[in-house]
Image: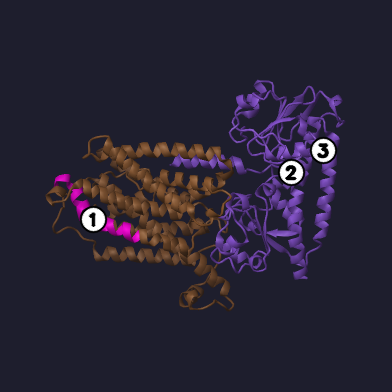
Chain colours: A purple, B brown
């Protein structure tokens, strides 16, 4: 039993680890500088990419057979216009629906199965189980794009993928559109008269996310106060909160990122013992979001912000 | 002294056996009272003794809670009280089940998960989580039911397997069958879990323990099983004492030893399944608490069983109080607390028994 728990905990730790480096190094730490000029197309190759994690990846020609083992990377590749070069994506990459989903796993990667797709570029979120070493041994270049810890990290990854796939201009376009959309969404919520508090829920046992996480940074941009920040002592990123703490924190806004995994909604939250009196529950400011959109660090985070922003605006008007 | 306490039970059979001394019974009740008081008073949200007193005088079924500390009264009645009560129930269930299994198998290392109840419960819960993903059944509490069925099913399978393996009089066969069943179910569970990474966190937080989400509904659902299971084990305390002396001792009372084993194993499994369904697979309580009682008070089941029930309840309430307090307002998994106390204790027990029994 104990071994079993350890195994589960190790896998889980791998799954939910979303730190990039120290939070203090926001932005810059996750940015990587493409070694070559960002000029697009096949002409830019060969090139060398220096990853933020310290690795270097050499690409002799523009990749034509890309395998993505990361749902976020899949979204990014399709957003920047590299979708046609993608031949296989992992079993969690369900967006966009046109992505060629396979049984490949990003959590238990099998080098042989990946190599079976004859990739000339593999993109993964984590170097698990000797993935990079295994693929290097069979001469497959592998880019690791770990979970970003803020939007700057997202922009840097988009650009890196743009460079690696020969879609630099496509990546630039996505980044500038995201920047514009984020700015207008942030502007739409105005300046709060008081700090509006938010509880971000990852599952129905009250696992939450602090401001040190990607999603927490998004809340900071929207001017929200994350109640999980008081629990950083035990788990700086994703603490499990006590029910009574959530109730006594009286969050103005509750965001449910456990609608798909755990079927949570406004009714199930209101039915929890003692939760009916929470301001967010009383005023109906319980937002049910798509678990995946809220946990990826790709372009769809703009959709998430647009879904949450009206609630923030409404709360601000009430507070004023 | 430690070694003496763990020696094969003294041949102090019927009649005129040690009964639970009133002093110790009083001490056990007092300890449970202290644990419950601590559990009620201590938590991430500070409440004063006066507020707790007021809460006790104004239960929610006597009207809506209003006034300046309505929020605290809600927290106490809706969240903290049920959690303390459920913790006490689960601790009592696990400790009593552990003592029962140890009596039946005459094996000091027997614990509530010995016959595969833990592995079965985790597999049941995992399957329920994976299969009901995205359906409203999750809210209907199908996971605890599946965990209960898994625990009971695993032990039933171990029992049938153990009997089919031959030597019906030797409980070791049953233990080995339990080990085989547990290993098999754990393998199946790991496979399901790894192939359904979407549900991984769900499964994981279920395994870690679920007192975090306790409410009166889960407490009420556990109570009947606790009453029935603990009641049946208590009713067999004399026979367990006789069994400790030898099978002939039981036979001489006109009772079949195999029947005693079957009934106590069934009742202990009921206890374990109810505990796991309500709170996840919490380890070490079922082994630490009965052994502590033996060390302090001797090996008669007429003492060990009721004291294990009381101390098990007190221990888990205190462990859960620590779980929600030491990193407040974040939770520490309760299994971490019980194992951190349990593992060193277990070593002491093993060291003390090495010379004679191992």
Task: Pick whichever, A81 or B354, lies toward us.
Answer: A81
Task: Classify A288 as above or below B104.
Answer: below
- For disc 3, the neighbor class at 10 Å (few under 14, some 14 to 19, many from 20) is many
Res. B237 mark: 1
Q: Which residue is mark 3?
A: A171
**Residue A93 position in % (x across, y down):** 67, 39
> Of residues B307 and A143, which is closer to you in this image?
A143
| Observer able to see residue A38 | yes
**A241 left or right, relative to A189:** left
Q: Callout 1: residue from which chain?
A: B
Part of the protein shown in magenta: B226-248
Q: CA distance from mark 3 to mark 1?
A: 74 Å
Q: Identify the element where label 1 is drawn.
A: helix
Q: Can residue B204 be seen here? A: no
Label 1 – label 2 distance at C-alpha: 63 Å
Q: State which mark lies toward you, 3 or 1.
A: 3
Q: Nearer the viewer, residue A58 or B260?
A: B260
Which secondary structure is most common in the magenta stretch?
helix
Residues at discs 2 and 3 both on one chain = yes
Residue at point 55%, 59% (across, down): A242
**How far is the residue under mark 2 from the one under mark 3?**
12 Å
Q: Residue furthest left?
A: B252
The residue depicted at 26 percent of the width and 44 percent of the height is: B105
Chain letter of the residue beneath label 3 in the structure image = A
Q: Is residue B117 left or right of residue A138?
A: left
Is disc 1 surrounded by few (<14), some (14 to 19) or many (20+) residues within 10 Å? Answer: many
Picture quarter with the C terminus of chain B: top left
The residue indicated by pointer 2 is: A298
Q: Earlier in the sequence, mark 2 or mark 3?
A: 3
Observer-side mark, 1 or 2, equals 2
């Amino acid at each position: 039993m104990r071994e079993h728990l350890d195994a589960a905990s190790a896998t889980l730790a791998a799954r939910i680890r979303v730190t990039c480096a120290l939070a203090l190094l926001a932005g810059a730490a996750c940015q990587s500088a493409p070694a070559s000029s960002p000029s697009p197309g096949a002409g830019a190759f060969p090139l060398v990419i220096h990853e933020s994690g310290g690795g270097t990846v050499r690409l002799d020609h523009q990749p034509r057979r890309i395998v993505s083992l990361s749902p976020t990377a899949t979204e990014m590749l399709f957003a920047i216009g590299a979708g046609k070069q993608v031949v296989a994506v992992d079993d969690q990459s369900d967006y966009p629906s046109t992505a060629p989903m396979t049984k490949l796993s990003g959590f238990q990667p099998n080098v042989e199965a990946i190599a079976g797709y004859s990739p000339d570029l593999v993109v993964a979120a984590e170097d698990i189980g000797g993935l990079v070493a295994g693929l290097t041994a069979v001469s497959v270049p592998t880019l690791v794009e770990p979970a970003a810890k803020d939007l700057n990290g997202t922009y840097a990854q988009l650009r890196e993928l743009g460079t690696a796939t020969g879609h630099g201009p496509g990546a630039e376009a996505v980044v500038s559109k995201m920047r514009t959309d984020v700015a207008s969404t942030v502007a739409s919520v105005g300046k709060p008269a008081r700090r509006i508090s938010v509880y971000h829920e990852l599952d129905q046992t009250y696992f939450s996310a602090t401001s040190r996480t990607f999603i927490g940074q998004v809340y900071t941009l929207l001017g929200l106060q994350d109640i999980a920040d008081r629990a950083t002592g035990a788990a700086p990123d994703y603490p499990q909160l006590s029910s009574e703490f959530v109730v006594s924190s009286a969050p103005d806004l509750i965001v449910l990122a456990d609608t798909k995994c755990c079927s949570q909604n406004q009714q199930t939250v209101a039915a929890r013992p003692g939760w009916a009196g929470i301001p967010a529950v009383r005023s109906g400011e319980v937002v049910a979001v798509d678990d995946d959109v809220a946990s990826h660090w790709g372009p769809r985070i703009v959709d998430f912000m647009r879904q949450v922003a009206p609630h923030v605006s409404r709360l601000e008007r009430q507070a004023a | 002294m430690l070694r003496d306490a763990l020696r094969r039970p003294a041949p102090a059979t019927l009649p005129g056996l040690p009964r639970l001394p009133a002093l110790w019974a009083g001490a056990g009740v007092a300890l449970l009272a202290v644990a419950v008081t601590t559990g009620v008073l201590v938590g991430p949200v500070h409440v004063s003794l006066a507020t707790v007193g007021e809460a006790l005088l104004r239960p929610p079924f006597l009207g809506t809670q209003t006034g300046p500390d309505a929020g605290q009264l809600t927290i106490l009645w809706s969240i903290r009280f049920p959690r303390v009560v459920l913790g006490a129930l689960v601790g009592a269930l696990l400790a009593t089940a552990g003592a029962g299994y140890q009596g039946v198998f005459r094996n000091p290392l027997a614990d509530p998960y010995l016959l595969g109840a833990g592995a079965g419960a985790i597999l049941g819960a995992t399957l329920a989580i994976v299969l009901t993903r995205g359906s409203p059944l999750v809210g209907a509490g199908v996971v605890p039911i599946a965990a209960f069925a898994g625990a009971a099913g695993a032990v039933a399978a171990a029992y049938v397997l153990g009997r089919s393996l031959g030597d019906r009089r030797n409980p070791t066969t049953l233990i080995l069958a339990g080990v085989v069943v547990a290993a098999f179910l754990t393998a199946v569970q790991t496979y399901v879990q790894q192939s359904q990474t979407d549900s991984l966190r769900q499964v994981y937080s279920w395994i870690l323990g679920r007192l975090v989400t306790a409410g009166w509904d889960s407490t009420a659902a556990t109570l009947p099983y606790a009453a029935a299971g603990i009641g049946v084990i208590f009713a067999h305390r004399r026979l367990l004492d006789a069994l400790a002396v030898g099978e002939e001792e039981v036979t001489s009372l006109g009772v079949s030893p195999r029947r005693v084993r079957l009934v106590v194993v069934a009742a202990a499994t009921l206890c374990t399944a109810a505990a796991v369904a309500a709170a996840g697979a919490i380890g070490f309580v079922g082994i630490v608490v009965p052994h502590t009682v033996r060390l302090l008070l001797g090996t008669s089941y007429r003492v060990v069983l009721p004291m294990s029930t009381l101390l098990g309840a007190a221990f888990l309430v205190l462990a859960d109080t620590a779980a929600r307090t030491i990193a407040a307002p974040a939770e520490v998994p309760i299994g971490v607390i019980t194992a951190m106390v349990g593992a060193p204790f277990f070593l002491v027990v093993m060291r003390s028994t090495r010379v004679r029994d191992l």
